[in-house]
Every structure is written in C-alpha cells, then in structure tokens.
Amino acid sequence: MSHLFLDIKYAKIVGVQHERFKTKAESPYHGQCRCKICGDSKKSKTMSRFHFREHTQTVFVKCFNCGYTNSLANYMKMYFPGEYSEYIFERYRKDVNTSPVITTSSEVIPEIIEVCDALDLPYVKDLPDGHFVKTYVESRKLPDYPFQFAEDFFEFSSQYKKDLDETARPKYPEARLIIPFFDRKGRVFAYQGRDMSGTSSAKYLTITVDKSVPKIFGIDRANFRQPILIVEGPIDSLFLPNCLASVNASLVATARKLETIVPRKNITLIFDNEPRNEVIVDGYQQAIKDGYKIVIWPKEVAKYKDINDLVLAGYDPYKIINKNTYSGLTAQMELSNWKKV
C-alpha cells in the first residue's frame, strides 16, 4: 500500500525544523533546506543542499554536500524519533482502517490469528504434563493463548537485542514464560518474558523484534470500531473483551496514541487496584484530567491487586468494570474515596 501522502505530510513537518526550508514543488514533491547532519556550507549561510524528493511512491532525502542518502522514514527514525513514532502510528492506522473489520461480541474475546512457530521456542501447551511452566499457566487459569517457554531467556533474546544488559544476566540460565506480541498480520513484533525462578529483580522483561510496530499488546485481536479497554499487563488483558495492554508505557500515553484510531469516549483505562501506590494514583489523576473514563475498584475487591487475582477469587472482572466506570467530576470524587495516599 502506498503511503506517499503521509510521506509528503511528514516531509513538511520535519522540513520546517531545518534552516531555510521551502517546498519547491508539490507534484512530484520536492523540498529543500540546509543539512542538519553536516551543517551544509560553513562559508555561506544561504547554501541549501539537503533535498526531500518523491520517488516511486515514497519520499527520500539526500544531501549534495555530505552525500547522506536515505528514505524519509529511516531519516526520521535516526534524527527525529518523536515524529517517526507518530508517522509509524499513522501508517498503522491507515492500514488498519483499510483492512477487513474484525467483528466481535462484547462478551467474547476474539480468537488469535493462527500462527505457526511464532518464535523458535516450544509452546507451553506442548510441554509434558507436570512441567513447572505448564503447571503455572494452569494454576493461574490463564486464557488460551500461544504462550511459549524459554529455558534460557537471555541466550535466546540476544539474537534480537544485542545490547542486553550483561550486568543483569544471571549466572545460570533463567527460565521464563514467553508472551508473544502479534501485529495485525499475525507476525511477532515483540515478546515479554515472565520470570519463573522467583529470584530475578525484573519479573517481566520485554524484547522488541520489530521497532516499526507500536509496542501495544493485543492489536492483533482488537476491533477498533468498538469500545477499547486498556490495562497495563498482557496477561490481564487476555481476560477482558477488546482489551489492550500498555506494557512499559503509561495507560494515558497509550490511550493518546490510540486516539488517532479510537474516539476518546470509547477508551476506558483500567489501573491496578493499588490505592497506596503514588504512581498509580498519579495515573488516575492524569486520566481524569485528560477526560478518559476510568475504573475505580469497589471496596469488596480491595484485597485483589489485578484482573488475574479477581478471576482466581471467582469474580467476573468485566461485570465489576462495567459497574464501576466513571469520568469527570464523578471519577474525581470516587478517586478521592478510593486512594490512600
């Protein structure tokens, strides 16, 4: 699919951040400015030898002073990461809006795309009965999902992340439950490893395989034309219909990204049930300020921290969420009664 219109839009957004930028032609697109990489001519401040040019349904950049040449996308990725992130998300939105709609019932979690050999690791379901990871998955009553298993997480992950923190690498192989993240085409773009030893200082570690996809868990299963729920952890999201997980980002930051696809009124943020956690309480405050709907957990479930805990205790978290979703002044009043900090 061509993204030429988007390329031209971002060529202009990035272009105006260069000295002496001007658009010389709209079709085929041509922009010109001074080069940020080499600084262009030191003798003449009027020299502008950095060009944005349309070619074969995309935009490329080239400096005729230092010779730098690249696609606009790769140029932004290296020198304008903020704009690059927005560009990628808009590309993703365009592809989603032109792809077949996933129809779902609000009561049913849509099945994951069938993917063979997501990662070169064994699936938990194929492990022998009694295996400690399989036992963990069963004991937590986790929904059906292509969980995998890495016997040595750091060794396996080194192929995707060359700069893994060696100081954090354990002396012995560290076994982890693997939670793959799939894009809309069923391809793995990231995965999360849940420590199974109980000794790691990092209970969850997330590895990115493809940086071009927004790091949001559940985008493969989501129907963006229906109300969206957002939680923090991938496992919790599997218990709820049309639910995404923000992973390492804040819930509010993830919601803001989604607003290019989903109206704000259709987004509900579900924080963990930790009224004494200042970071979480601050997240609630920011969500209310930004106008999002939030869930304030009732006193009857005060001792349960997250969605999985509620399920294990026999509760239906979706029913609780529906009865305890608030916004605006009502949300602020409920939060004041709930928080303990």
Image (cartoon, rainbow, N blue to C red):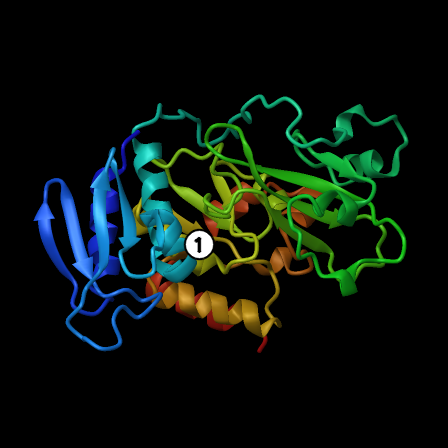
Residue at image location 26% in from the left, 56% down from the top: 64
Q: Quadrant of the N terminus?
A: top left
Residue at image location 59% in from the left, 23% down from the top: 115
> Is residue 317 found left or right of 57 in the rendered image?
right
- Which sits in the foreground, 255 or 326? 255
> Is residue 155 found left or right of 287 in the rendered image?
right
- Which sits in the foreground, 266 or 320? 266
- Which sits in the foreground, 106 or 101? 101
Does residue 253 appear anywhere in the picture? yes
Question: In x, y percent, where is residue 38?
Answer: 34, 67
Tell me which corner region of the image, top left, top right, bottom left or bottom right, holds residue 276.
bottom right
> Is residue 126 found left or right of 282 in the rendered image?
right
- Which sits in the foreground, 266 or 47? 47
In the displayed structure, 19 sits above or below 128; it is: below
In the displayed structure, 291 sits above or below 109; it is: below
Q: How many marks?
A: 1
Mark 1, residue position: 254
Q: Label 1 is placed on what type of residue?
A: Thr
Q: Dot 1: what SS?
A: helix
Q: Quadrant of the C terminus?
A: bottom right
Question: In x, y percent, where is residue 49?
Answer: 22, 60
Residue at image location 36% in from the left, 61% down from the top: 80
Question: In x, y percent, where is residue 24?
Answer: 9, 53
Disc 1 crowd, CA 10 A, few/some/many (<14, 14-19, 20+): many
Does residue 85 appear anywhere in the picture? no
Question: In x, y percent, where is residue 258?
Answer: 37, 48
